[in-house]
Every structure is written in structure tokens, then in C-alpha cells.
Amino acid sequence: MRVIYVTVALFAEAKPIVDRFRLKKTAIQPAGKFQTFAGDGMALVVGGTGALAAAVATAALLSARPPEEGDVFLNIGLCGAVDPGLEVRQAILAHKIVHRETGRAYYPDVLVRHPFREAVVETVPRVVRRVPARTADAVDMEAAGCFEAASAFLPPHRLAFVKIVSDRVEVGDGEVEHGGPCDGSADRRAAVGGNGMTAERVAELVEACLDDLEDWLFQWAVSGKTALDGRPTVDGAESRPPSAPPDRDEEQLVALVGDRLRLTETMRCELRRLVRHYRLRTGRLPTWLLDRTDPPPNSKQEVKARFEQIRNEFLSSAFFASLH
Amino acid sequence: MSKSETNFFLPHFSHLYIEKEARRYELAQKVVDRLPGATVVEIERYTDVFARPRQRFSEQKRSRKLILAVKRPPFVYRGADVCHRFGHEHFYYASTVLNCVYDCEYCFLQGMFPSANLVVFVNLDDFFAEVDALLARHPLFLSVSYESDLLALERLVPTALHWIAFAAERPGLTLEIRTKSANYAAIRRLPPVRNVVLAWTLSPDPIAGRYEAFAPGLEARLENARRAAEDGWPVRLCFDPVLHVENWRDLYAELVDRTFTSIPADRVLDVSIGTFRVPKDYLRVMRKARPDSALLHEPYECRDGVCGLPAEAERRLREFVAERVAAYLPREKIFV
């Protein structure tokens, strides 16, 4: 089963996702300070605000159950729109993330179709309501940290950063932090990141994009299958190429023959390649190898001779004979 | 790509990454104009995108992106020993484009580059200046399509035209533009240039169909090569790589016969013949990227860091094709 790893900053952002995907509260090991939720093919962490917190939470989530081929990572959260063309409630997909503090830029691969507008997101260290220049289309506080951590586990085409516009950021002289009045208590303000929004409003904004997100997310998660897994299809159906065997069978055969004949590691490596090639060419496992393991060899010289015999047998098979 | 995949993946060149510095070059502007629907992303250095860690060549090739960049020195490199030098003493290559629009299963580029995206270097004049500096010392054989297929990309990125115009005024330069494309029409309006060799890589149809995804079939390549030869261009035919597949003798015998039925032998400059060979490190990456490729998992031998069929097998393949070509061309025009 594919897993979609999700990092959000706030519980208010997590709530609609937890409800929609019926996630259950869980605990990741090693135990940490983070709230985590998991469900059918999804694992979510609430990491707190800021790039550093996001990076730590993402790394903790991905370390708890290291991703496998095809798993994807999603950072979802709110952002401020610097581009006046962006509407409040609009969801954007980042194709470039700039980390204000380090100056580094990150580029998630955008390979599959999606329903979002694409944009450049700048990760800033604090909530702002004015920036000195338009260096990005939107500002957030976590994306760069999430990318830095998640890219250590997953390739860039399996990372996505969806941001929902919560408010506007002006462009003008000097940067101004968001210190405006909040319609809740100080604690409540802190709980939603300090930009003067209620938890209900945050949840409402995330909820509004979930229909689009859900459809796209599960299609996207299907696209990461390797040739061995089968060709990716929109409906999720797999078609295994006839020549692509499960590695496990080959590994078991190589291990069995290797143990019985007491092959060295180098010999096993070569045997692995020969078995793989034989199977790709013929569609069959060379189970005849097992007949060559009896009786077991008595000396190192005999191991060497028996392996050479097997090697020659592969190379003189019908296919290679065409070279002579 | 299947229909469902086509509907699922973004089209090739949906995104155009441009170095800030590249914007001021005319070639960059031309490419931008030719991709009006592309999402443009500004970048600092092309390596920020092209050389990211953990990229998947096999996934990216389903939706390749284009990166426009400014190359820094050096611009021209000495040719590798595993490549034919066609009797030229000074063999170099230059890459104004990195990566190829085709997806050949045996291609070394997938082992060489960390990304399937294409990089176009837009500062052609810097390449030309370095070639001029070399020409001041000695004549030069320069291949400009080793790490890409320029002609295949010509409609979008017109670089072959510039190279041809440059070579036309420099008799000491022999330029080779190698291609699998059927895109000769993109340069057909140019008068042929004696020191510009148009080289077509030819493969039997079953091999082109199975191992050379997205590349035109044999008939289209032959037709393009024939037209170029008729127009007076020096045309080179490359049976390279000759692959060790089932019935290889029948396939390559038929290929050679069909080739010289289509193109009169006296219009062919020369022929090169080579077998599959790839640096060991590249092969390791290629095998990992294509675990289902029987071709890449053959038990190749490694000699001097280069993997290929056993020497005797290589010789048999090359000699078989050379013998067949020798029925049409004198031996001195066959480079093995």
C-alpha cells in the first residue's frame, strides 16, 4: 500500500484532513512531542510553525516508517499572497521554494497534471504582512524546512507543497511583522500561528481545497510505480510486464545456491546478475541451478570450479550461442 | 506512453527553467516564444534543477522539462577513445544541449546525467570562440550531438542552424551532427556545407521499435538521410550500436541491404559500426534505473572501465556488419 506522508504546522490545518481521511491519533517511535495521525495509506504529523520545526517533524515522521517506492510526501498549509492575482481561499502548488534565511531554492518536480495554480513560495521566519520586494508569489513558514527534510527520503517528483491563501501580503518599504489585532486570546492566536486568524477559519480554508486535493492526491500517489511494480495507470490498475520478475524469487534462488555451494560474495553478485539476465531473457527462473548444488563442494578450489561451470552453462545457453 | 499516462502526466516541456543570466540571450528568447504555454521558473544556476539529488530519470522522462542556461568554460572537450574519430587527428566534442528527447534503452546518457530534463546552453558564441581558438592551432573534427540529438530538437531550439553557419566559414573544421530524427526538413533550406557531416544512426525496425522509444522508425530515418545525400550533404551512416539480440544476423543483414537500397552507396560519405559499450559506472546506474532490461543486464565484460560484450563477441558482431556493408562500400569508408 502506498503511503502519503503529510506535514502540517497547526492542528487547525490537520483537523479537516484527519476528518476527511478518517485518520486516528497515533504515536510515532521514537516518541516525540508531535501529534501524529495515521489511517488508510496516510500518515500525518503536526509539526508546529517555522521551517526548523517543520523539518524536525517531517524527519521524525519519515524516519518512523521509512518511505518505500511510490510513497509521496505532502506539505499543506496556509500562505500569504504576495501576487495580487491570487485569491484568498485559492490553493497553489509550489514549483519553487525559496528559503529566506539561507537563500537556498528548492524545486519539487511537477510531472503530473494537477488542479492548482503553480507559484513560487518563499519560506519566511515569521508571519509578515508586508515584504520589501516581490521575490515570490506567496510566503509561508514551513515549505523550505519540509523540503530539506523530505528530500533526504524521497525523490523530488514525490514531494508536493500545497498552500492555501489565507490573507494578503503587501509589497512596500521595509518588512512588517504581523502584529495586528486578533479576534481571540493570546493563546488562541499563538495556536494558529499569530496571523490573527481563528482555528475555525484556518480549518475552513483547508477544508475548502480538500475535494480537489483528494482527487489529485490519490492519482498522483499512483504515479510512482517503477517498471518492476507495473506501469502506472490513472485507475490504479497494475499491469506487470511479463519480463519483470519479483526480485524475491531471484534472491531466494541465489541465496540457496550460494549457501549450498559456499560461494563468495563476489560470486553471488555475479550469479545474481546471471540469474536476472536469464530470467529477463527467458521469463523463467533458472531452477536447474539447484541440480548443480549436489553434492556440496569439498574445497575452495572445487567451489571455484563449480561456479565456473555454472557460469559457462549460462553463457553457453541458447541465447549466447548465437554469438558463436 | 499509453493514453492514460498521456492524460496523467504533464506534456513534455510544460515547465521552462531559465537562469536569470540566460534571459538576455537571443536563443533563450526564441525558445520562450516557441513555448507560449510553458510555466516559466527563474533559477540561479542550471545545476540547482539539473543536479538535484535523488532524481528519477525514469519518471522524469515521462514529462521532461527544459532548462535554459549559460555554459561556463570549458566549452569543448576531447573526444573519448570509445568513439570513432574517422581518421581525424584532433577529435573534440561540444554539447550545447544536454540530454535527448528520445528514450533509447541502451543510451549512456541515462547513466551519465542525474536528470532526464534537457539543458540548452544559450551562449553559443562562447562555444564558437573556443572552437576558433583551437582552429588557430590545428584543424578539428567536432561532434556536436554526442550528448543530445540537436536535429530532433531543432524546431524548438535552433542550434544546428547556428553550428552549420559557423562551420560554413571555417574550412579547417569538420562538424558532425548525429541524429536519429526525421527532421532534416528543419535545415533543408540551407545550402549543403562540405565540411558539415550529417550522420544518421540506423537500427533494424524491430530494434528501433523495442529499444528506441520515441525515435522515428527506420524508414523515416532512411528517407531523411537519402534526401540530405541527394541535396549534396556529406552523409554518414552509423550502425551503432549493433545490439546482440535474437536473430541479430538476420536483422542487421536486412538493415544493411535495405539501407543501400534506399540510399545510393556513392552518395554515402562513410559508415561507422560499433557495439554496445558504456562506462562501468554508467552501466550500474542504468541497470538500477531499468531493472527489467535484459539488454542492460547481459553479463558484459569490463575492460579499462568500459563494459561491453566479450571481445570476441564484439568482433563477430562488428565484422558481420562490416562484411555486409563492404558489399556496397569500399573498406576504407567503413570505420569499425
Image (cartoon, rainbow, N blue to C red):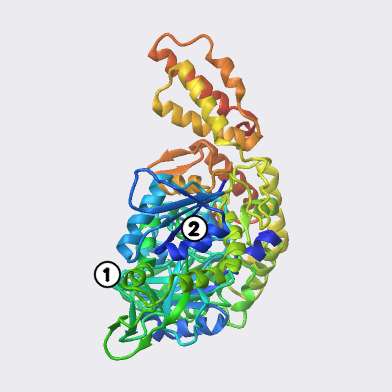
Total numbered badges shown on the rendered structure: 2
Q: Residues within 10 Å of mark 1 (few under 14, many from 20)?
A: few
Q: Residue under mark 2: which chain is it in? A: A
The quadrant in which residue B50 appears is: bottom left
Q: Residue under mark 1: which chain is it in? A: A
**B61 horizontally vs B283: left or right:** right
The mark found on residue B150 in the picture is: none
The residue shown at (55%, 73%) is A116
The residue shown at (57%, 23%) is A313
Task: Look at the image and tell me whether residue A151 can be seen.
Answer: no
User: Same chain for the residues at labels 1 and 2, yes or no?
Assistant: yes
The mark found on residue A102 in the picture is: 1
SS for dot 1: loop
**B45 horizontally vs A210: left or right:** left
The quadrant in which residue B319 appears is: top right
Task: Look at the image and tell me whether residue B100 can be seen.
Answer: yes
Quickly name the residue at label 2: A158
**A261 horizontally vs B14: left or right:** left
Work out how far the residue at label 1 is from the one at label 2, CA to CA, in angstroms: 23 Å
The residue shown at (33%, 52%) is A33
Along the line of sight, the residue nearer the viewer: A161 or A43: A43
Give the amino acid at mark 1: Thr
Quadrant where the N terminus of chain A lies? top right
Q: Mark 1–mark 2 contact, CB under 8 Å? A: no
Quadrant where the C terminus of chain A lies? top right
Place of residue A101 in the rendered image (x, y in percent of width and height, measured from the top left): 27, 71
Place of residue B179 in the rendered image (x, y in percent of width and height, measured from the top left): 57, 65
Give the amino acid at mark 2: Arg
